[in-house]
Image: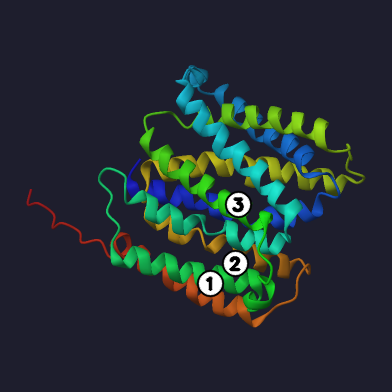
């Protein structure tokens, strides 16, 4: 798989994550760890089903403990800290801070072998960050961030965890993406234990809520982690970082289309900023010089 194809594959995860808020809202009142346990179980099962068509894929689970530690910290660790942050601070503020992860991803990836942070990468990701701030805060960040506390610090931890997981995944690029199924199943188990210890069980009341949960497990909390793994291991990780700011924008557009949020001027401004940032960050990929064909 070429670098451009891998980058585009990774970007499909960003598109799927744009459905996360809408599907979560449609899933009913199930507590977060219970929801995570069920959806990650579906996501892990998705990988297991694919193994039936690829004999030998299960061997991918035979990995050093460091690989498992990375995967479990990335998936379960991020969600555990995120849910803890939501309990301690307003969800919108947590989301705003947590979405610093693409910026950290671009900066940290400069430390990888063969990668170099260039000015256009930095400009692109900063424009994307500005767009994400606009769309999440609805243009009123000064009022929204009036009180800073434990929940906000945990949100910063979320940004570091996911960006760190993504960058370090590049260091274990030889590990097959099939191992993500194992990450999801372990995350499902740990989430179930947290649910039993911290929450009361609430089951969906309608078919629509069950379908939303199934959609979460198949897409944003399932296939997205597999395609993201391909992207960060084999694609242009800096371009992916800048393009990831499309997720909160697309998420807001999905919510607006579903009638769950009102349209706001910040959506248009964010769209322009994020699109411009992604194009600037990806200029090497978009305007790549093609070598002349050799004479036959």
Residue pictured at 79% horizontal, 55% vertical: 25
Sequence-wise, the earlier of marks 3 and 2 is: 3
Mark 3 touching mark 2, by CB under 8 A?
no
Give the crowd class for mark 3: few <14, some 14-19, many >=20 residues within 10 Å. many
Closest to the observer, 26 or 2: 26
Mark 2 touching mark 1, by CB under 8 A?
yes
Closest to the observer, 23 or 289: 23
Mark 3 touching mark 1, by CB under 8 A?
no
Check the image and report above or below for 61 versus 44.
Answer: above
Sequence-wise, the earlier of marks 3 and 1 is: 3
Give the crowd class for mark 1: few <14, some 14-19, many >=20 residues within 10 Å. many
Q: Whole-Å distance between the Cαs marked 3 and 2?
A: 12 Å
Q: Whole-Å distance between the Cαs marked 3 and 1?
A: 19 Å
Q: Residue furthest bottom?
A: 265
Residue 215 is situated, as x and y percent measured from the top left of the image, at 72, 45
* Labelled disc at residue 131: 1
Looking at the rendered image, the disc whose residue lies closer to the viewer, 3 or 2, is: 2
Q: Is residue 131 left or right of residue 116?
A: right
Residue 2 is situated, as x and y percent measured from the top left of the image, at 33, 44
Residue pictured at 9% horizontal, 51% vertical: 294
* Labelled disc at residue 249: 2
Query: How many numbered callouts?
Result: 3
Name which quarter of the figure residue 40 lies in: top right
Looking at the rendered image, the disc whose residue lies closer to the viewer, 2 or 1, is: 1
* Labelled disc at residue 16: 3
Q: Tell me the SS state at disc 1.
A: helix
Q: Is residue 292 left or right of residue 50?
A: left
Check the image and report above or below for 136 versus 89.
Answer: below
Give the crowd class for mark 2: few <14, some 14-19, many >=20 residues within 10 Å. many
Residue 235 is situated, as x and y percent measured from the top left of the image, at 37, 47
């Amino acid at each position: 798989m070429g670098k451009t194809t891998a980058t585009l594959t990774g970007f499909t995860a960003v598109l799927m994550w744009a459905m996360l808020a809408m599907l979560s809202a449609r899933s009913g009142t199930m507590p977060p760890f219970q929801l995570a346990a069920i959806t990650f179980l579906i996501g892990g099962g998705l990988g297991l089903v694919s193994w039936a068509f690829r004999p030998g894929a299960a061997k991918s689970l035979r990995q050093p403990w460091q690989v498992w530690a990375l995967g479990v910290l990335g998936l379960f660790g991020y969600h555990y800290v995120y849910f803890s942050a939501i309990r301690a601070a307003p969800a919108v503020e947590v989301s705003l801070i947590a979405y610093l992860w693409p910026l950290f991803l671009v900066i940290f990836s400069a430390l990888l072998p063969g990668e170099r942070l260039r000015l256009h990468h930095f400009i692109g990701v900063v424009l994307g960050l500005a767009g994400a701030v606009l769309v999440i805060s609805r243009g009123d960040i000064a009022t929204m961030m009036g009180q800073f506390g434990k929940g906000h610090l945990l949100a910063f931890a979320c940004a570091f965890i996911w960006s760190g997981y993504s960058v370090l995944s590049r260091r274990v690029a030889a590990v097959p993406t099939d191992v993500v199924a194992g990450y999801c199943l372990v995350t499902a188990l740990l989430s179930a234990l947290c649910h039993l210890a911290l929450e009361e069980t609430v089951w969906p009341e309608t078919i629509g809520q069950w379908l939303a949960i199934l959609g979460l497990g198949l897409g944003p909390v399932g296939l997205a982690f597999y395609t993201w793994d391909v992207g960060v291991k084999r694609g242009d990780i800096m371009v992916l970082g800048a393009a990831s700011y499309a997720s909160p924008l697309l998420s807001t557009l999905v919510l607006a289309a579903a009638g769950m949020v009102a349209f706001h001027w910040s959506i248009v401004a964010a769209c322009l900023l994020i699109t411009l940032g992604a194009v600037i960050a990806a200029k090497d990929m978009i305007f790549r010089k093609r070598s002349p064909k050799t004479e036959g």
